Image: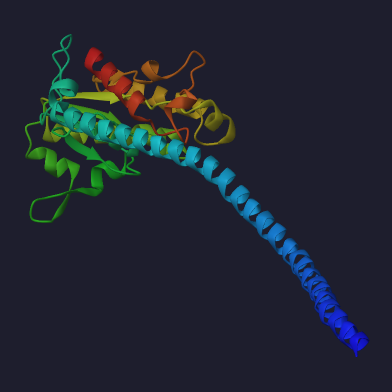
Amino acid sequence: MKKNRRKIKFFSSVVPLILFIIIGSVVGSKIVQNHNEDAPNANQNQEIQTNVIGENSIPKSENTVADGEQENSIKEESNKETEQIENSDEKEENAETDNSTNNNSKVTFDSSVAFIGDSRTQGFIMYNGLSKVQDYSYIGLMVDTAVSKKIVKTSNGEKITLLQDMKNKDIKSVYIMLGVNELGWSYPQVFKLKYGELVDEIKKVKPNCHIYLQSILPVTKSKDQSDKIFNNTNIAKFNQLVQEVAKEKNITYLDVQSALKDENGYLPEEASTDGIHINKKYCEKWLEYLKNNS
């Protein structure tokens, strides 16, 4: 009986201990397993987070610099545009004072002065702000069409020739530059004949006005060497005819080309984008020549 009681006491104390050991071992294994399963996710999240930060931080830093430069560039351009507009407005207000007269010249480019010419003359008038002169310039105008083409629009919307309009204006000086559109004419002597007729017609409507025949302006070297018609050899021949008209009609020939050409006789490349038409800087040189030589 005593032995049985000892066995029961032994088992009652040992069994719980064994169960505790077994349960502890199972729980510990589970904890280790869970830790090992969670560890890759933690590392993966850390790697993704690092990559995201890395991708966003470097470009963001670079973009900040680029955006700053772009903003400064825009501001600079805006300031330039504002300055140009202000200068343009100031020039417009003072155009009559700055461009119409010269302290060393008695010439006044007002409503008593007329300009006859093609698109080159259009640019000349526009760039120099000669808003008060009689503008008889027209794209493609030639010595024959200048007499007959109706290019002047009256107040009632009717179109008339420049000669008809001149008759009703107090014009004292007429500056003519024609010839570049005629360079392709097969018979240059016809050019001379028609130019002379234009001068005669102007004298009929304005017998007391002073007529100036301006030389045809040269073209750039690149244009000269690439074009069979619009080249300086051809221009020189036609300028000789213009001089002959001026001499025969007893009027003034103005060698405007001398103020614009370079040492080789070409219009500088910087003076034109197409080799023929003149930019603002060179139109101002043209005007200066007229002021000093009229």
Image quadrant where residue 28 sits = bottom right
Tally of marks: 0
Task: Tell me which residue sits at (46%, 26%) in the image.
Answer: 270
Furthest residue toward top: 104
Task: Give the camera-side residue of 273 and 267.
Answer: 273
Task: Identify the residue shown where x is 10% and y is 25%.
Answer: 208
Task: From the top left corner, tell me how far across and down residue 243 is, in percent.
Answer: 35, 21
Q: Is residue 141 above or below residue 114?
A: below
The image shows residue 228 at horizontal and vertical percentages of 56, 36
Q: Nearer the viewer, residue 116 or 25?
A: 25
At 35% from the left and 22% from the top, the residue drawn is 244
Color style of the picture: rainbow
- Quadrant where the image shows the C terminus: top left
Residue 176, percent across and down? Answer: 27, 30
Residue sitting at the far front: 2
Which residue occupies the extreme bottom position in the image? 1
Instruction: Tell me the quarter of the image containing the N terminus.
Output: bottom right
Decide which of 7, 195 is in the foreground and name it: 7
On screen, residue 267 versus residue 245, left or right, reads right
Q: Is residue 188 left or right of residue 49?
A: left
Kindly tell me whether residue 86 is visible in this rendering.
yes
Residue 186 appears in view: no
- Relative side of 200 to 231, left or right: left
Q: Residue at x 37, y 30 (%)?
A: 279
Image position, residue 32 (x, y; %) = 78, 66
Q: Residue furthest right?
A: 3
* Residue 180 quadrant: top left
In the image, residue 165 sits, relative to residue 156, either above or below, namely: above
Viewer-proximal residue among 252 and 188 = 252
As displayed, is residue 266 above or below residue 136? above
